[in-house]
């Protein structure tokens, strides 16, 4: 059946579907002079619930285990479909439509290569292991690029798919050169790498015929980096002191019991171990905190400086420190419940973030024109998911 | 199959060319009828793509030409899908996801499978992997471990007289010849307490490539050399059955599982992975000890017709360990095994056969 049987959209059609209550014109925009477009703010809404997602999660975990991992792509796709489908903007939800069988082929290929690599390295077959490692390093930016394309093209809103128009060459700058610079110059280049990567992601994003634009600058990324560095240094000092105090207390207590007062006696094995243990756990916690802060702060900054097609601007009001608190308490809950709180933690985080995200638009959201992009092969997506590369926001 | 009942769904229509949403109804019967702005459009039902259901998420029906119809009329659509046999597998998954009974069953199943994998799966895989590991890999283990033990003052040079050492080496050659397997066996006699109680004490252990260490303290504890030969035969059992390597692989496997479970919680996984590794340091599994005991029993019964000497030294080691109440080390804890009574009973049963 040809599409000509379907009517073309009316260019100035009314909205037949009731708008959600969260959209209202901004107070300032009401008094705007004629000719200046009216700005409308739409808050994102998340309708997922912890109980519902818990059932989806555990059933999919069990199915993945029973099928020895072959069900994993379906589990991943359903999870995303749940989160996308429960995210609403202006009365319409998002949709994730990746093909699980395509993902499975990618997973199997990446899994086989990884197994081959592990085998080669374990047997010290460096002639096989090192070329595989080099191949991975050389392909890394390309894989990220493919993954971004795949993710964007499989995201749908209002019947139109997103797309990604960044090039592979740009990816070799943002994910290749920038990462190399960051690994050489460390903290001096890392914020620049973050900036390059976020800019690459936002500028390349498309929705229908509209293109993304990033108004951000590199300086705030350095501010974020400095904040997390300061946090790490101060926290590291506290961790060392805490380790010292606990170890000292232990040493004093056990020393009394043994009635030994020599300094050498006080610095025995258990005392040193306790000091190292407390310091180690504190550093892990600190690392989590610093990393969560960087993630939350960059996400907020990016959302506050992203535009789409010159008519839509996103904005974020959530607090990065709130996200840090959420990350720490989520991790604790997951450890205490042996992982059973994982779905609750995911819902809690998503709700916190999405409740603090909105878009401001000077045109109605139903005026975008479509432009299809094929998702391409799932290899990049499979690689980034399996090898735990952090792309996306 | 029964003919699917005709259903009418209310929802939203997107044409796929613009982001404009329009109210529409879709009737599914002999053919599909889309009603849009009072106009009706017909499609063949076979040309529709019905995306599988996800709990609470608006359903999507893909129309020819990139258009789509989205609806929250879950029940009628589900009834139609059931009757027309669409999305059978994923409808089943969605049904499981919608019920607490199946979710709780899944919790039990997941824990049982994971527990089973950790308790039986990983040891079995580790044993297999240890068996097929090429011999070249083994050689480096022995030297590294010995170096570590000497550096940490767990063992030191033996204080036994030269003649006694030579005698023990001669006797070991009998065990070595009997054990076979082509490993470069060697017996190292060492002091188990070079720096006081921190050492390994009265002990014997085998390293993967056939290096067997026996301490002066164990030699002193024995009332006859038969007892020592029983212990050495037990250690060759650990070598030929590759228990040491299997233990290393088990630690790796557990680390991998914890990493997979904690997912992207990179920081927590490194910490969590250390815990099972530490638990494993208790020594070989009971199954491995029993296997090595059976190897030794073969040797003892073939040579002396009884495993009594091995039982005796096991019992004496246990008594000594209780008296010292020393902490177990990660080596083959020959002396402070918690189930010595069971092991002696098993040896007696072998003798009685
Ligand atoms: Zn043993």
Image (cartoon, rainbow, N blue to C red):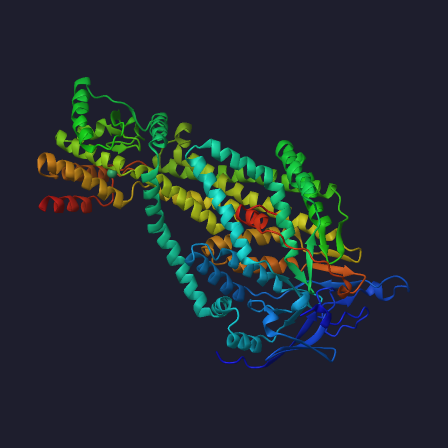
Q: Is residue A378 above or below residue A92?
A: above
**Location of residue A140 in the rendering, given as x and y in whole percent from the top left corner:** 60, 41
**Location of residue A231 in the rendering, given as x and y in whole percent from the top left corner:** 62, 41
Q: Nearer the viewer, residue B257 or A27?
A: B257
Looking at the rendering, the quadrant in which ligand 1 lies is top left
Given the current orientation, which residue lies at the most extreme top position?
B162
**Location of residue B271 in the rendering, given as x and y in whole percent from the top left corner:** 47, 44
Q: Is residue B325 visible?
A: yes
Given the current orientation, which residue lies at the most extreme right position?
A34
Q: Is residue A369 above or below residue B23?
A: above
Q: Nearer the viewer, residue B204 or A286?
A: B204
Q: Is residue A308 above or below residue B233?
A: below
Q: Nearer the viewer, residue B28 or A348?
A: B28
Give the quadrant of the N terminus of chain A.
bottom right
**Location of residue B20 in the rendering, given as x and y in whole percent from the top left corner:** 74, 68
- Residue at image x 22%, y 26%? B216
């Amino acid at each position: 059946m040809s599409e000509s049987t379907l009517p073309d959209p009316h260019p100035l059609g009314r909205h037949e579907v009731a708008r959600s209550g969260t959209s209202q014109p901004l107070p300032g925009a009401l008094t705007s002079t004629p000719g200046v477009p009216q700005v409308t703010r739409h808050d994102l809404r998340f309708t997922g619930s912890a109980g519902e997602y818990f059932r989806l999660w555990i059933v999919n975990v069990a199915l993945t285990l029973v099928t020895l991992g072959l069900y994993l792509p379906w589990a991943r796709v359903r999870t995303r479909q749940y989160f996308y489908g429960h995210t609403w903007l202006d009365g319409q939800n998002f949709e994730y439509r990746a093909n699980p069988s395509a993902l499975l082929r990618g997973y199997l290929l990446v899994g086989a290569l990884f197994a081959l690599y592990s085998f080669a390295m374990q047997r010290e077959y460096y002639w096989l292991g090192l070329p595989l490692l080099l191949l991975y390093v050389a392909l890394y930016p390309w894989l990220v690029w493919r993954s971004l394309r795949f993710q964007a093209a499989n995201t749908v809103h209002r019947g139109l798919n997103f797309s990604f128009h960044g090039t592979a060459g740009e990816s070799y700058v943002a994910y290749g050169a920038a990462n190399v610079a960051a690994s050489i110059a460390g903290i001096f280049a890392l914020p620049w790498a973050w900036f390059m990567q976020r800019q690459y992601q936002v500028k390349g994003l498309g929705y229908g015929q509209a293109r993304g634009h990033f108004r951000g600058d590199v300086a705030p990324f350095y501010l974020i980096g400095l904040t997390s560095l300061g946090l790490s240094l101060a926290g590291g000092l506290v961790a060392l002191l805490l380790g010292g105090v606990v170890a000292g207390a232990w040493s004093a207590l056990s020393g009394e019991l043994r009635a030994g007062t020599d300094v050498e006696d006080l610095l025995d094995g258990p005392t040193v171990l306790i000091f190292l243990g407390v310091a180690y756990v504190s550093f892990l916690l600190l690392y989590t905190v610093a990393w969560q802060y960087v993630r939350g702060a960059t996400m907020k900054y990016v959302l506050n400086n992203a535009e789409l097609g010159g008519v839509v601007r996103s904005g974020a009001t959530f607090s990065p420190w709130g996200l840090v608190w959420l990350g720490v308490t989520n991790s604790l809950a997951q450890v205490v419940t042996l992982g059973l709180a994982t779905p609750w933690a995911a819902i809690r985080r998503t709700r916190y973030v999405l409740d603090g995200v909105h878009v401001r638009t000077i045109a109605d959201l139903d005026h975008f024109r479509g432009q299809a992009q094929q998702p391409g092969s799932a290899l990049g997506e499979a690689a980034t998911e399996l090898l735990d590369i952090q792309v996306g926001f | 199959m029964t003919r699917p009942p005709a259903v009418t769904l209310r929802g939203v229509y997107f044409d796929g060319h613009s982001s404009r949403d329009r109210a529409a109804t879709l009737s599914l019967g002999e053919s599909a009828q889309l009603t849009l702005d009072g106009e009706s459009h017909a499609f063949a039902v076979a040309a529709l793509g019905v995306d599988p259901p996800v709990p609470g998420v608006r359903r999507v029906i893909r129309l020819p030409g990139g258009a789509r119809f989205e609806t929250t009329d879950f029940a009628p659509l589900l009834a139609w899908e059931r009757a027309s046999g669409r999305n059978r597998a994923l409808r089943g998954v969605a049904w499981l996801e919608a019920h607490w009974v199946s979710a709780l069953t899944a919790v039990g199943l997941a824990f049982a499978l994971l527990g089973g994998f950790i308790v039986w799966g990983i040891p079995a895989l580790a044993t297999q992997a240890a068996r097929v590991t090429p011999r070249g890999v083994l050689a480096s283990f022995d030297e590294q471990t010995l170096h570590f033990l000497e550096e940490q003052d767990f063992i030191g040079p033996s204080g036994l007289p030269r003649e006694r050492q030579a005698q023990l080496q001669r006797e070991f050659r009998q065990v070595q010849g009997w054990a076979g397997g082509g490993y470069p066996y060697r017996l190292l006699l060492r002091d188990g307490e070079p720096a006081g109680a921190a050492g390994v004490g009265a002990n014997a252990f085998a390293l993967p490539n056939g290096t067997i260490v026996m301490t002066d303290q164990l030699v002193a504890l024995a009332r006859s050399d038969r007892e020592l030969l029983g212990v050495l035969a037990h250690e060759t059992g650990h070598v030929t059955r590759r228990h040491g390597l299997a233990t290393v692989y088990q630690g790796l496997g557990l680390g991998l599982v914890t990493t997979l479970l904690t997912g992207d919680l990179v920081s927590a996984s490194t910490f969590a992975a250390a815990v099972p590794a530490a638990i494993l340091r208790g020594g070989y599994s009971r199954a491995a000890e029993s296997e090595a005991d059976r190897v030794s029993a073969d040797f003892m019964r073939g040579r002396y017709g009884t495993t009594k000497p091995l039982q005796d030294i096991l019992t004496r080691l246990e008594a000594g360990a209780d008296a010292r109440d020393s902490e177990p080390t990660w080596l083959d804890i020959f002396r402070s095994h918690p189930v010595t009574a069971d092991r002696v009973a098993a040896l007696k049963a072998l003798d009685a056969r």
